[in-house]
Amino acid sequence: MPDVFTKEKRSEVMSRIKGKGNKDTELAMIQILRKHHISGWRRNQAVLGKPDFVFPKQKVALFVDGCFWHGCPKHSNMPRNNQEFWAKKLQGNKVRDRYVNRELRKMGWVVVRVWEHELKSAGKVAGKVRKALG
């Protein structure tokens, strides 16, 4: 199906997608952490890769990755329009994620990545975080 917007309008629409406060990811994770009484987390900390949540005392960096933007093997699908651009953009995100994981681990951090679709299983996500926290 062709895009209903012009190239300029699509660019404007995509530029308005927020990187913070996304209800499907970050805010849902906050609800899980609170429901399962997991405390000690901070947001917006100056840590490499800008983790969504940081547990500074335990040196745990928690990322909540959107299925589309980070290339979830189960749910990511390539847009039909402008495929060359999107392939480059989404592959770049994956490469950056691997780099950030590697560098944080070198600095002694534990890295936890949670897929957007995993947030539906709050208990499993909470268990994953608790395990990382030790």
Image: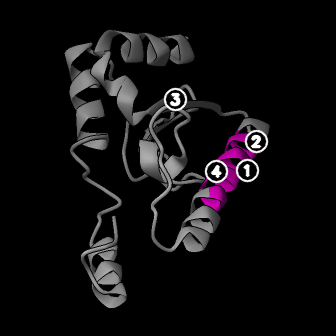
Report, in whole angstroms, how far the alpha carbon at label 4 lies from the one at label 1.
9 Å
Give the mark, 3 or 4, whose residue is nearer the N terminus. 3
CB-based contact (under 8 Å), mark 1 and mark 3: no
**Residue 125: which quarter of the image?**
top left
Number of on-image labels: 4
Examine the residues drawn in magenta and state their main secondary structure. Answer: helix
Which amino acid type is marked by label 1? Tyr
- Tell me the element at label 3: loop
**Residue 60: which quarter of the image?**
top right
Residue 51 drawn at (x, y percent):
49, 46
Q: Does the magenta stretch include residue 98?
A: yes
Image quarter in which the N terminus is found = bottom left
The disc label shown at residue 57, or none: 3
Report, in whole angstroms, how far the alpha carbon at label 4 lies from the one at label 2.
12 Å
Which amino acid type is marked by label 3? Lys
Q: Does the magenta stretch include residue 92?
A: yes
Of badges 4 and 1, nearer the viewer stands: 4
Give the mark, 4 or 2, whose residue is nearer the N terminus. 4
Q: In this view, does 9 lie to the left or right of 104?
A: left
Report, in whole angstroms, how far the alpha carbon at label 1 lies from the one at label 3.
23 Å
Mark 2 packing: few (<14 Cα in 10 Å), some, or many (20+)? few
Q: Give the range drawn in magenta.
A: 91-104
Q: Name the residue under label 2.
A: 102
CB-based contact (under 8 Å), mark 4 and mark 2: no
CB-based contact (under 8 Å), mark 1 and mark 2: yes
Q: Is residue 77 left or right of residue 106?
A: left
| Residue nearest the viewer, comparing 73 with 6 | 6
Vertical side of 24 occupied by 92: above or below: below
Q: State the residue at coordinates (44%, 42%).
A: 67
Q: State the residue at coordinates (24%, 33%).
A: 28
Of badges 3 and 2, nearer the viewer stands: 2
